[in-house]
């Protein structure tokens, strides 16, 4: 059943023992949105917690003032998760049991009992902001968490998903005390030496296909070991191939510790929909940015099928999704 943010707020207010799920390879939007929800729910006296893969170091501030609590989940909420295949290993037990999904992906598969999805929103944080406003006051820490989701999913407000509403939401969050300048500096202007080394290693794998319209890059577990980087240091790397002049589709495949291959696509959505490309492999996302996963096949094989699919779309005149 499709619902509005106001109804989502009412459902959250009616339940307790709420577990908030984030997607695998968590980014600023799924984490910022989930921790903002968790903070407000706890302020309302509810037992609530966020279930996530290991939190990347630069997002650790989102856990500040979140109370640890143990309980048996009675209400399961997926945050910024387009389909159940994007659930991390820790959340696999909740497949088929998700009560509410709050999201902004046009490719959302409507797997939850109730879903609040706004595809025109630039980030899930925009949708969560509407729900939290309906639930009551939003303090500066909650606003900062939401701003994290908003700025990371828009590339610091540079991507084509940005709308006037996006800027309006950012304005409201700043008025509520969000530390926008600090978050932007941390997200976009701060790197560890390990992250820079990882970027160097990843760029050494860069290849071009289809008259240089497709750029491919990979990130292996060996690269992570050699650089000393953490999994969270990979964020932002998939955007690099698409920044190269003349490239219409950037494909980055990352080898995860569990053997799963995570493919991230960034594209010129007017020429090739990243969502349409990834949907061929059970994934999804947005027209300009999407992802999918492969399990049980080597990286070279995943590379071949992804590039061939991208070539097919480009040679057929492109699609939009």
Image (spheres, rainbow, N blue to C red):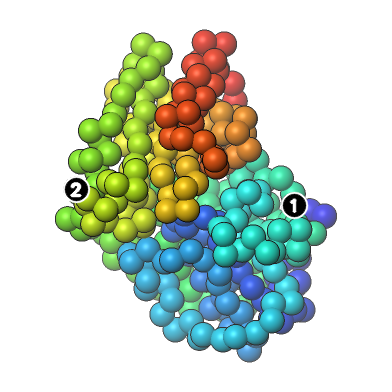
Q: Mark 2 points at which residue?
A: 197
The quarter in which the N terminus is drawn is bottom right
**Picture coordinates of residue 306 (x, y %)?**
50, 27
Q: Nearer the viewer, residue 39 or 258?
A: 258
Residue at left offset 42%, top offset 53%: 257
Mark yes or no: residue 240 visible: yes
Q: Horizontal placement of 146 versus 46: left or right?
A: left
Picture coordinates of residue 225, whole percent (x, y): 27, 53
Q: Position of residue 260 (x, y in %)?
A: 50, 46
Instruction: Give the Cα separation between the discs numbered 2 and 1.
Output: 39 Å
Helix or strand or loop: what does disc 1 sit on?
A: loop
Image quarter (top left, top right, bottom left or bottom right) of the C terminus: top right
| Mark 1 residue crowding within 10 angstroms, few (<14) / some (14–19) / many (20+) | many
Q: Which mark is residue 148?
A: none
Q: Is 153 on the left or on the right of 225, as rendered? A: right
Q: Is residue 286 above or below residue 196?
A: above
Which residue, given by chain and number where applicable, does mark 1 sit on? 111
Q: Considering only vertical position in the picture, is 108 above or below 246?
A: below
Query: Which residue occupies 44% across, 58% down?
Result: 28
**Foreground residue, 38 or 222?**
222
Frontmost residue, 51 versus 130: 51
């Amino acid at each position: 059943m499709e619902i509005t943010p106001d109804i989502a707020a009412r459902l959250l207010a009616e339940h307790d023992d709420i577990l908030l799920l984030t997607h695998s390879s968590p980014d600023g939007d799924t984490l910022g949105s989930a921790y903002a929800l968790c903070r407000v729910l706890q302020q309302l006296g509810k037992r609530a917690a966020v279930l996530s893969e290991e939190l990347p170091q630069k997002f650790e501030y989102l856990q500040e003032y979140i109370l640890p609590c143990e309980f048996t989940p009675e209400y399961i909420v997926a945050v910024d998760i387009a389909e159940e295949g994007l659930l991390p290993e820790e959340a696999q037990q909740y497949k088929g049991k998700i009560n509410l999904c709050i999201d902004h992906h046009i490719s959302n598969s409507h797997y939850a009992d109730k879903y609040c999805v706004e595809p025109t929103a630039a980030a899930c944080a925009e949708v969560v902001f509407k729900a939290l406003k309906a639930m009551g006051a939003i303090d500066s820490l909650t606003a900062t968490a939401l701003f994290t989701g908003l700025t990371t999913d828009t590339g610091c407000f540079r991507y084509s998903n940005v709308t006037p509403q996006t800027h309006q939401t950012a304005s409201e969050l700043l008025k509520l005390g969000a530390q926008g300048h600090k978050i932007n500096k941390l997200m976009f202007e701060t790197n560890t030496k390990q992250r820079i080394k990882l970027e160097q290693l990843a760029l050494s794998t860069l290849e071009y296909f289809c008259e240089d319209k497709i750029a491919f890059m990979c990130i292996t577990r060996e690269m992570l070991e050699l650089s000393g980087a953490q999994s969270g240091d990979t964020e932002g790397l998939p955007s690099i191939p698409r920044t190269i002049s003349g490239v219409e589709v950037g494909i980055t495949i990352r080898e995860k510790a569990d053997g799963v291959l995570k493919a991230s696509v960034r594209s010129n959505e007017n020429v090739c929909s990243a969502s349409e490309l990834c949907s061929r492999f059970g994934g999804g996302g947005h027209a300009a940015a999407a992802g999918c996963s492969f399990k049980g096949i080597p990286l070279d094989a995943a590379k071949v099928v992804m590039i061939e699919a991208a070539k097919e779309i480009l040679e057929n005149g492109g699609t939009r999704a």
